Image (cartoon, rainbow, N blue to C red):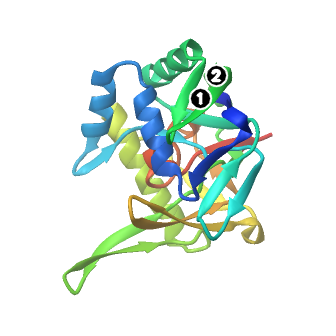
Amino acid sequence: MRLTVTMRPVNNSLRLPLNYQYALQGFLYRSLTETSFASFLHEVGFQKGKRTFKLFTFSRLFGPHRIYTKQKQIEFTDTITWHVSSVLEDLIQQLREHFLMSETVQLNGQTLYINKVEVRKTSMQEGCYKIKMLSPVTVYSTYEQEERKKTHYFQPPDPAFPHLVQANFVNKYEAYYGTAPEHEFKVSPLAEGELSKVVTTFKGHIITGWLGTFEVDTSPEQLTFAYDTGIGGRNSQGFGMFEIIE
């Protein structure tokens, strides 16, 4: 399921750090109406071996804005649109209830008016689509070097990129359903020149991701799952959300 909420900041000014995913993640958790459910997601999640998955993702904020490079801030100056997706219907319904019942909400200590709340449940009819990233897709591996953990981020043209996207999909799918997916999950960039590299931070960790257009080839059921949970890693930190290109 996917929720879209439209908000307007008081005095048409919402200032956030350029790397505002952490603020949005906290905003999402605080907006859940059941504290036990929020605690379960935050502290436990869904397990596959040593890996934990929250099974939700969210987009960047969309709307008119200004960038203040020296201050490392972004200011949204009019209506803002935000998307949240999850295979967990309770999560989407709790967010819907919260936003519908609230005239205003607080994000990063600033007030926003709620203009509109929409929820839609999407079931893909086909398995092959072109997609556009609404938040950067990130693919990485972690290893030890000289007794220190290192993280290597892969670019979409790298042959390892689609394999790691598929491995991540399989782990998420098995964590939720308890069984392996029946079909492959193939992702490939459509045009390298249209890909945009994004370097950001989350709680002090530098993360590299990519915006742009890709092609996904899998079964309709598996594509629906990916649409709800995101592709690549760090989905619950605001990475890997996509929209279908008609």
From where the camera sits, is residue 15 visible? yes
Structural distance between the alpha carbons of marks 1 and 2: 5 Å
Examine the rendered structure and indicate whether residue 147 appears above or below residue 102. Answer: below
Examine the rendered structure and indicate whether residue 191 appears above or below residue 118. Answer: below
The residue drawn where x is 54% and y is 27% is: 105
Discs 1, 2 touching: Cβ within 8 Å? yes
Amino acid type at circle 1 is: Arg
Helix, strand or loop at label 2? It is strand
The residue drawn where x is 40% and y is 19% is: 33
Residue assigned mark 2: 120
- Residue 77: x %, y % from top left: 75, 44
Earlier-in-chain disc, 1 versus 2 = 1
Helix, strand or loop at label 1? It is strand
Left or right: 194 with respect to 74? right
- Residue 63: x %, y % from top left: 74, 43
* Quarter of the figure with the C terminus: top right
Left or right: 21 with respect to 191? left
Figure quadrant of residue 196: bottom right
Examine the rendered structure and indicate whether residue 27 appears above or below residue 238. Answer: above
From where the camera sits, is residue 180 visible? no
> Of 211 and 181, which appears nearest the observer?
211
> Of 103 and 52, which appears nearest the observer?
103
Q: Residue furthest bottom?
A: 146
Residue 2 circle label:
1
The residue drawn where x is 50% and y is 23% is: 95
* Label 1, residues with CA under 10 Å away: few <14, some 14-19, many ≥20: many
* Label 2, residues with CA under 10 Å away: few <14, some 14-19, many ≥20: few
Left or right: 46 with respect to 20? left
- Residue 35: x %, y % from top left: 31, 23
